[in-house]
Image (spheres, rainbow, N blue to C red):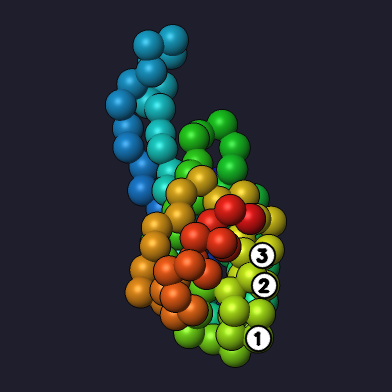
Amino acid sequence: MSSEGCFSPVLRGLSSFCWPPTSASTSKPASLRILHVNDVYKPERFAKFRSLAKQCRGPNVSKVVLPGDLLGGSLFAATHRGESVVDVLNALEVDYCVLGNHEFDYGSDRTRELMDK
């Protein structure tokens, strides 16, 4: 699949980046694809992102990075004080997740508690 095929108009903020150094074992360039999405406030959008991330995995190295603002800011997150979002994030197979301002909507103690799940 080409990197252009990894873009979805439904998920704004999704990006793909290929870094083309040559691999020592082959003459083909190696690539790194970083999939990124943030400010997702509806659980069905996480499902679309997961499907897209699975499509983009392959012979190239792919990393799923979420830059924060996930645990708050939506009715879905507020219902269980962020825990419902953590369950979804664990199913996404996220490689890196960064804390944003909404990760502290329920206080730093709750943030620490959710980070252990």
Amino acid at dot 3: Val
Q: Is residue 24 left or right of residue 51?
A: left
Q: Which residue is mark 1?
A: 79
Name the N-terminal-most of marks 1 and 2.
1
- Residue 70 appears in view: no
Determine whether 75 is above or below 15 in the image: below
Determine whether 103 is above or below 55 in the image: below
Label 2 close to label 3 by CB (< 8 Å): yes
- Report the mark closest to the observer, 2 or 3: 2
Q: Residue at x 43, y 69 (%)?
A: 108
Q: Position of residue 77 (x, y in %)?
A: 59, 80
Q: Nearer the viewer, residue 61 or 85?
A: 85
Q: CA distance from mark 1 to mark 3?
A: 14 Å
Amino acid at dot 1: Thr
- Report the mark closest to the observer, 1 or 3: 1
Q: Label 2: few (<14), some or many (≥20) within 10 Å?
A: some
Q: Position of residue 57 (x, y in %)?
A: 59, 43
Q: CA distance from mark 2 to mark 3?
A: 7 Å
Q: Is residue 83 left or right of residue 32?
A: right
Which SS class for mark 1?
A: helix
Residue situated furthest front in the rendering: 109
Q: Position of residue 87 (x, y in %)?
A: 68, 63
Q: Position of residue 8 (x, y in %)?
A: 52, 68
Amino acid at dot 2: Ser
Q: Find residue 84 and name its label.
A: 2
Q: Residue at x 66, y 80 (%)?
A: 80
Which SS class for mark 2?
A: helix
- Residue 88 appears in view: yes
Q: Which residue is mark 3?
A: 88
In which quadrant of the rendered view does residue 59 lie?
A: top right
